[in-house]
Image (spheres, helix red, strand yellow):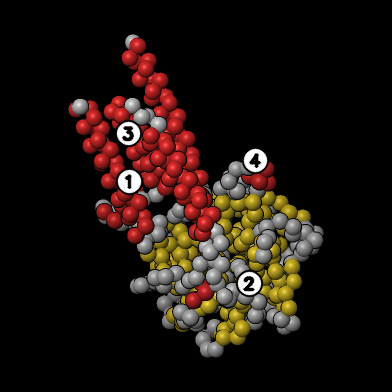
């Protein structure tokens, strides 16, 4: 009886922890970045190659920093209050840069900071969500891609409008809408060296690289004779003679593992392509140096975990030699915060572990007290079936929720299998111990 009481107490403790973690995960509106410290997802090089612009999370707050590539000194150049500042891009002339400011619901507005200590001009309001932006070669115009904020905040499948291209004077003023296509997804905007063409990626079943003629207002697939696979984060150099981009490595496609993204370089005149990295991870934001045969980029060794733990690196595309960028990043605040611990615990691994522990203890109790060791297995199987049926029931109304429920049911099915194996093994081990 004492052993049964101890089991029941253990089951109660684990059940309370399990419910608490699930409840916190549902009710908590913070993301995995709420307490994160580390590099953001985009970098930019100054015209003289001396300075790297990047965003950096310091205990959950993201701001723009400039880092000297000569001595590693880092300077914070924006002070966000209720927003996060990200995706900086240097002006091709002068010391200014643009960046995006995300509000509490994730809507991003476009800003132009005229210098490290200069004023910050807000170019768009909260009526649109800006996903990317780029300067014209003379720095006078900023091109950007945006979607109405109300549509950005709607679930996929319920959006009435998509993304389009826009332009605005770098000093502010009225915007000009360049396209009216309501694209499902537009990203990775860049401008040609002569200022006549915009390049960007667009997803319409496959990820394509698009060239948009500003004068003609026409778009077309860029180099379709050479580019047949999905590519991401394109960046051009030498009057579009070289194209750097990231793409899924062939080995990760062929071996059925998680897709891994490496850095590639193409000579656009011939389509000749070579692979520059072999990290078996994820590479992002390649950026050409202006006066050296090098490319700066971000590498995420913890891919696909979140928050992303990026490292800034460079590669010499003549020799293929890679090296890390040494910068004196801010020291994160290490003081203990209960909310940070709770957020760290509320993750799929913890939830899965608590679920298996709870049903494992229930299996031991049901065997020793009720002689029904497979009862917890049946309960888990029924729960899996209910969630699976629910995924099919809501698929017509909300496909994305249905996908989430189906993934949850698949995870529960695996857990049910593990519990079944444990129940069988526990009974065998108990029988063996009794015989001894």
For the residues marked 2 and 3, what is the alpha-carbon distance in whole angstroms?
A: 51 Å
**Secondary structure state at the residue bearing disc 4:** loop
Q: Residues within 10 Å of mark 3 (few under 14, many from 20)?
A: some
Crowdedness of circle 1 by 10 Å Cα count: few (<14), some, many (20+)? many
Q: Earlier in the sequence, mark 1 or mark 2?
A: 1
Say which residue appears at 40% left-offset and 20% top-offset. Answer: 428
Point 58% across, 76% down: residue: 161
Tell me which corner region of the image, top left, top right, bottom left or bottom right, holds residue 143.
Answer: bottom right
CA gap, disc 3 and disc 4? 38 Å
Q: Where is the N terminus found, in terms of image quarters?
A: top left
Q: Which mark is residue 18?
A: 1
Is 75 positioned to the left or the right of 256 in the image? left
Viewer-side residue, 331 vs 168 = 168
Which of the 4 quarters of the picture holds residue 207?
A: bottom right
Marks 4/1: CA–CA distance: 36 Å
Between circles 1 and 2, the one closer to the viewer is 1
Residue placed under numbered mark 2 in the picture:
183
User: What is the number of the mark on residue 56?
Assistant: none
Q: Nearer the viewer, mark 2 or mark 4?
A: 2
User: Does label 3 or label 1 sit earlier along the sequence?
Assistant: 1
Query: What kind of element bears circle 2?
Result: loop
Which residue is denoted by mark 4 in the rendering?
A: 255
Q: Residue 53: x and y, percent? A: 49, 66
Q: Up-down: is 246 above or below 100?
A: above
Could you say where residue 21 lies in the image, as x and y percent from the top left?
33, 50
- Point out the frontmost of discs 2 and 3: 3
Q: Which residue is mark 3?
A: 361
Give the x, y percent position of residue 125.
47, 81
Q: Is residue 355 left or right of residue 94?
A: left
Is residue 420 visible to us here?
yes
């Amino acid at each position: 009886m004492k052993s049964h009481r101890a089991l029941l107490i253990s089951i109660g403790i684990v059940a309370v922890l399990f419910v608490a973690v699930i409840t916190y995960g549902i009710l908590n509106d913070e993301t995995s970045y709420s307490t994160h410290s580390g590099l953001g997802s985009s970098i930019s090089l100054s015209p003289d190659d001396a300075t790297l612009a990047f965003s950096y999370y310091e205990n959950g707050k993201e701001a723009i920093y400039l880092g000297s590539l000569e001595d590693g000194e880092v300077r914070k150049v924006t002070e966000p209050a209720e927003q996060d500042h990200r995706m900086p891009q240097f002006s091709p002339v002068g010391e200014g840069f643009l960046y995006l400011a995300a509000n509490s619901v994730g809507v991003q507005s476009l800003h132009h900071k005229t210098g490290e200590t200069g004023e910050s001009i807000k170019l768009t309001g909260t009526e649109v969500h800006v996903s990317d932006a780029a300067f014209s070669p003379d720095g006078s115009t900023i091109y950007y891609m945006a979607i109405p904020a109300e549509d950005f905040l709607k679930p996929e499948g319920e959006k009435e409008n998509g993304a389009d291209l826009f332009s605005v004077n770098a000093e502010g003023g009225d915007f000009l809408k360049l396209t009216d296509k309501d694209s499902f997804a537009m990203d990775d905007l860049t401008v040609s060296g002569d200022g006549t063409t915009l390049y960007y990626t667009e997803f319409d079943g496959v990820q394509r690289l698009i060239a948009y003629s500003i004068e003609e207002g026409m778009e077309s697939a860029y180099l379709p004779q050479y580019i047949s696979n999905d590519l991401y984060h394109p960046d051009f150099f030498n009057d579009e003679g070289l194209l750097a981009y990231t793409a899924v490595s062939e080995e990760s496609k062929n071996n059925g593992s998680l897709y891994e993204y490496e850095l590639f370089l193409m000579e656009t005149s011939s389509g000749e392509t070579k692979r520059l990295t072999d990290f078996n991870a994820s590479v992002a934001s390649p950026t050409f140096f202006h006066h050296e045969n090098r490319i700066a980029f971000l590498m995420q060794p913890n891919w696909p975990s979140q928050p992303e733990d990026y490292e800034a690196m460079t590669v010499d595309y003549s020799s293929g030699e890679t090296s890390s960028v040494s910068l004196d990043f801010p020291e994160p605040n290490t003081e203990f915060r209960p909310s940070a611990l709770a957020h760290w615990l509320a993750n799929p691994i913890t939830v899965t572990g608590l679920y298996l522990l709870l049903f494992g203890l229930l299996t031991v109790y049901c065997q020793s007290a009720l002689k029904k060791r497979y009862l917890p297995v049946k309960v888990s199987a029924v729960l899996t079936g209910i969630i699976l049926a629910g995924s099919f029931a809501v698929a017509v109304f909300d496909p994305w929720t249905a996908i989430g429920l189906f993934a949850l049911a698949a995870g529960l099915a695996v857990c049910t299998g593990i519990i079944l194996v444990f129940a069988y093994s526990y009974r065998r081990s108990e029988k063996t111990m009794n015989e001894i």
